[in-house]
Image (tube, rainbow, N blue to C red):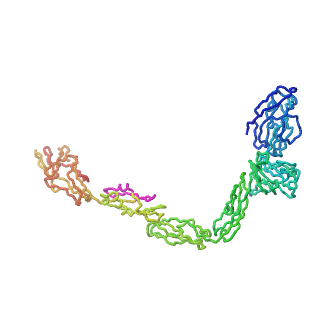
Amino acid sequence: MKKKILTFMLIATIPMASFSGLTKAETTESNQVEEVQGSDNIETSPIIDKTEETKTEEVQQSATGSKSETPKLKGKLKADAPLAIANPQTFVLGTDLTKVDPKTFVSNVANNGVNMKIEYVTKPATNLVGVYSTTVKVTDLSSQAMQTIDVPTTIQFGDTIFTRSGYANEGLSALTLHHGATPYITNTAGVTSGKGVYPITGAARIIYTSSVQSITTDHKVGTPYFSKSARGDDTSNEFCQSFNTPVNVAYGDIISVYTLTGNTPTSLPSTTATSLDGAQSLSTGTHYFEITPTGYKEVMKSSATAKTVTAELGAKVTPKDCVTLPASGTFTVSDTFIQAPDLKKVGTSQVQVEVREQLDSGQYISSTVTSSVTINADTTPPTADTVTQKITKNAAIPAPETFLTNIHDDADDYTSNKINISYVTEPTTTELGARTCQIALTDSAGNVAYKDATYFVGDETTVSNDQYGLRAEPVVIKQSELTGKTATEKETLIRERSNVQGWDIEATKEVSDQVALSSTDIANLPTKASTTENYTVAMSLGNLTTDIAVTVTDDVTFAFNATPDPLNFESTEMIGDEVTIDRTNPNWNIQVKDTRNNGSNWSITATVNGPFKDNSDPDAKQLHNALTYTKGSTETQILDNQAFAFYEGQSNEASIKTIESTKDQGFRMKINPTGVKADAEYQTSITWTLNDTP
């Protein structure tokens, strides 16, 4: 991450005897300093500091109280700029400054750093937090000009677990985590107001221990691969020297810190703090921390506690039932027991449960919780769910267990036939419909459960789903029964004839009055039928639909009773005048059979299919429009190929209607025989049509 760094003004006065030209304050923009992941170097902020003569020893010097001085220079210095300016630095406790390039402490190096030498004069110790000075010397190798610069250097706690000595508030142990590809821990005093040469508490026993452990393959905190302890009669200097830091660690490892009494309190300072103000205090005893890329994360602060369980014989008990998890932290319980209870035996048994605390590394710490489970005698009856059964009428009564599913008893295993299942009230299969039967489940302890189960009895004309049942028989209806009926009357007729029935299976009741018949299908039933015809009428109940088969038969006759006899006419003499020719059979008639008896009108038409012809001589004269019909005193000429309505009737009780005429009435011929071939036979044909409308 790159940061734009604020640059302060350089105020320097150079004696005229050795230098001239630098007489005013100047402002310059600092070089950008890149903060590298994992570096103990935390932050930079270049400023101009004083210059002084070179010192060679390393000192621990506070930056507060330093005074501005006129820089003392050796060699030649360019008149327009100093050799470099200070670049303040911040590090965490325990940082090894020998691995930090002195160039880090300066910026704006003259000549862009070419042929320039930068070296330490003094470095601050990093075992105590605070603000100190690092002195560097900048030398221009070309001109041999030199400049010494004091650079403010801040030492912060960083990720540190701090423990105070019992004497004079000295620091006993500051365990600082240094991040990087290979993280490591250093131990320093951290803070001090004494010399670290007095006994920590004076007690001749171990009062402090810090250890680093890995997580084992069985998810336990393993044996420490590094551990240091301090006795109360040790000094803090002795303990820090014995620590022999740094100690390489791995992310995911656990560091533990133990303190015996409140005389050596432990705390977690703020990472950017240079004092213990606002630090989080920890209690005495042992604290565990996971080493993570973001610092120390306290773990194992609390643990699961045992919870006793009381249940009946055969009841289900899970590992989660036997522990109470802490309110904080990421804890889970294994799905299986380490040591399981005996749920089939009355009494108390010990159980062991694995509890897991999840770590940031993906690993977890396993612990075992021991509890107890007490099993009492079985007083709970079996349980089961019922299943609705569909039974065919007059079929054998099914076994009672077919009405049940999910049969369970805490103490008895149904599969080993320890639960007795029997009817209290048996179902009946002799009657159609939805009903209930009652079934008893009895376990080996004598506990009884009663279940009311629903069943539905149907036949080959019945359809059903989970909720409803429908039934209707095929129906045959005569045409005459539909003639003249309204839609409502037709529906009533079909309901009665087909015996429409409906049931609400879930409610176990008949609801035939709720069955709906399709009004469209009712309307489509014929008002007449020439032959037997098949129809369907849809009926529905709730979400269930089926069809009623309806056959309509033609029991109504409206037709010619028989094919009319041929209509023959007498022979006539060939004379020059027009003549009328009578029928040879004066009693010729045509009959209609009408069984409808509905008062409707009807008529008969006759169509002469062309002129009379001598079929033996195509060239002979043809007799056009030769047929007449006489009714009373009115004689009507019948035109060839045109329908002639010669009779109109009405349907009544008389089923046979005979249409006949006297000799001088009805059908006759009227022709002029001139040109007609002698001794020839002339013929034509008539189409008779019976109409049910006038």
| Viewer-nearest residue: 550 or 442 | 442
> Is 523 within the magenta?
yes
> Is 294 within the magenta?
no
Quadrant in which the N terminus appears = top right
In the rendered image, the vertical position of residue 200 relative to residue 29, given as above or below? below
| Viewer-nearest residue: 681 or 687 | 687
**Residue stretch rendered in magenta on the structure:** 518-547
Residue 269 location (% of width, % of height): 77, 49
Q: Is residue 610 left or right of residue 574?
A: right
Residue 692 location (% of width, % of height): 26, 53
Q: Is residue 662 left or right of residue 339?
A: left
Can residue 181 be spotted in the picture? no
Can residue 676 be spotted in the picture? yes
Which residue corresponds to the image point at 17% horizontal and 51% vertical from the top-left? 667
Q: On the image, which quarter does residue 517 sit in?
A: bottom left
In the rendered image, the vertical position of residue 135 relative to residue 452, given as above or below? above
Residue 575 location (% of width, % of height): 10, 46
Residue 504 location (% of width, % of height): 46, 63
Q: Is residue 38 left or right of residue 447?
A: right
